[in-house]
Amino acid sequence: MSALLWLLPALPLTGGAALLLAGHRADRAAPTAGAALALATCALTAVAARTGPEAAAPFLPGLPVRLAVDGLSAPLAVTVAAVAALVLLAARAGLGPTDSAARFTGLMLLFTGAMLTTVTAATLPLLLMGWEVMGATSWALIGHTWRDRAATGAATTAFLTTRTGDLGLYVAAGAALAGGAAPLALDDLARTAEPWRSLTAAGIILAALGKSAQLPFSFWLSGAMRGPAPVSALLHSATMVAAGAYLLLRTGPLLAATGWGAGLTAWTGAATALVLGLVAVAQRDLKQLLAASTCAQLGFMVLAAGAGATTGGTLQLLAHAAAKSLLFLLAGAWLTTHGTRLLPGLTGAARSPRSLGLLFTTGALCLAGFPPLALWAAKDLLLAAALTRDPWLYATGLTAATLAAVYSTKALWYVWRPAPATTAPGARPALLAPLTLLALACLALTPLALPPLRTALERTVATGVHPAPHLWEAALSGGLALGAAAWAWSAGGPRLRLPAPFPDWLGLERAAHILVVRPVLAAARLAAAFDTRVLERAVDAAAYGTLALARRTDRVAERGLTGAVAALAAAVRGAGREARRPQTGQLHQYLAQAVAAFTALAVVFVLVREPGEAADQVRPDRKAPPCSRSWCSPPPPSPSCCSPCPAPCPTPSTAPSGP
């Protein structure tokens, strides 16, 4: 089954790359081909979620890559593939951009493949690969209409902001290696030694908060709404922004092991859900309202990761993916027909055609937390875990859930308000099919929060049994949602306004420019001035000095060397001319030269003979010195003969005469 797991991300990645390479030649066939590939990927994920395959391959020494569809990754992989297929079907039905369809569809498939890689990765290196491709393709998708400077600027802002947080993953990988988690398996990060464990947790929290648009990184999601509606429906519902929440849910044991990571994560999520809920209430642009609500709803998932409510966070992620995909697609459809995203300009949009209005109402009521829709059940499940951890955390989450009913009702008030009769095009049947499936998912996911399916989900995500909400908790959250919705409807949309800075997303983008962008640009200008006025002049001075030294060397040293070489060459030539003179070719001259040479050699031989040898020849009667016994043993027979040892002296033939 490992081949199935490798094929799971490879199918959309390969198909997306092929469409990108084909370019405009595939524009006509791209929407159909993309939808078919997405449906095939969805079928593969369903099979993989049922069989739970695993696969591994070598990557670096001691750092293999592993894929697995088990535990938390199984429901997330199915959700990602299903939402991608439905969004591409809706884009094929007329919600997608008409220009560069092959490029758009190819990027959507590449993004889906990268997200599936991120979800199924069991090791940090492979997760980083999917994470990086996902960030790059999201930049290209948000800025798909590249002639629109506002869209490309928003894409750049989103990319740079998320990349700032992504640096935390590299810090986490390095700290995990230093702490002893050699294979970098996600399940082993909690067993690293301190202080590396805390540094790993800090890096993962930073990356997750940036990708999920949590405080203080929430502002990038506002500009990202300039992308096409299918991009918002996919990236900002079940995939890109959900990747950070998924990472925190997956590394929950690491957060708990640090002693501080879980609390920081939970309170950051609760604060984002509350504050961005107020930002959503203050919006008059439908897509901006949905974007702020995305940050708020993701805050509940982050809260669940910190509170240890993995089951509730998973169900929240699934239900939010269905509801928010539905709402973003319908917002795109109304933008096409009405030419505006402002809520006052969408007055009466839900009345014609009424089918789209009913679908939008389903998604908005699910977002509001109305019982018995899925987000109501999911929030109760994760808030029950928050209550056991900290009552104040529970109260903050419950307040944020009540705000969800307010901003959802505000959108409904505008789109259902009576308006002058207008002629609006009917909904296409091809568009109604994926939207209806998303609306049904908002209701069909509710049983997962109730036993016995909740127990099965807990076994699937392998997190153990979590505290279940009491009946009074469910009644309280449902009652607060109904009461807040009734108040918001009676107050009317125009009166649901908040003072600055809530309509402007708390001024977070301006703050980022003041605190980060401007100092960085100032530092860059200072570095450029230093480079121009100091380094460049120093390099020029060094170059001019080198040239001057070279000229002086040429005048002094080079000329002296040239003269010495020329003199040596002249001497060699003169010696050669002198050596050629004896070479006359006449034999008698060669003979005379030989006689002269031998004569000279004889004279030299006579002059250099050894003096001792000559003295011996002149005084032949000189007697040899007496032989010493220290030289020879035994002593020589004759005193006239003595030779060094060990050669013996010869024995005389006759004995010496005399006494």
Image (tube, helix red, strand yellow):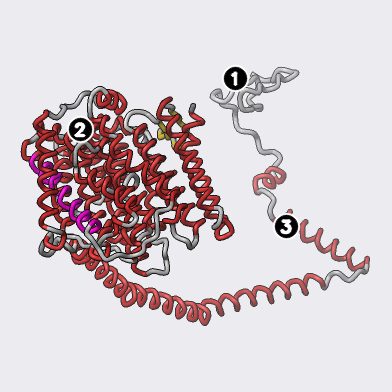
- The quadrant where residue 382 appears: top left
In the structure shown, which secondary structural element does the residue marked by tag 1 occupy? loop
Q: Which residue is mark 3?
A: 604
First-in-chain label (3 vs 1)? 3
Foreground of the two, 244 or 395: 395
For the residue pair 549 and 454, the one nearer the viewer reads as 454
Which residue, as the protein is rendered here, is positioned at the far front? Answer: 421
Quadrant (top left, top right, bottom left, bottom right) of the C terminus: top right
Query: Which residue carries the number 1 mark?
Result: 635
Pick whichever of labels 2 and 3 is earlier in the sequence: 2
Depicted 11 relative to depicted 138: above or below: above
Residue visible at 40% across and 29% down?
Answer: 49
- The magenta-colored residue range is 395-416
- Residue 281 relative to residue 172: left or right: left
Tell me the residue that label 2 is attached to: 309
Kindly indicate whether the residue at mark 3 contacts the one at mark 2 (C-beta within 8 angstroms): no
Q: Where residue 197 sits in the image (x, y, percent)?
A: 23, 36
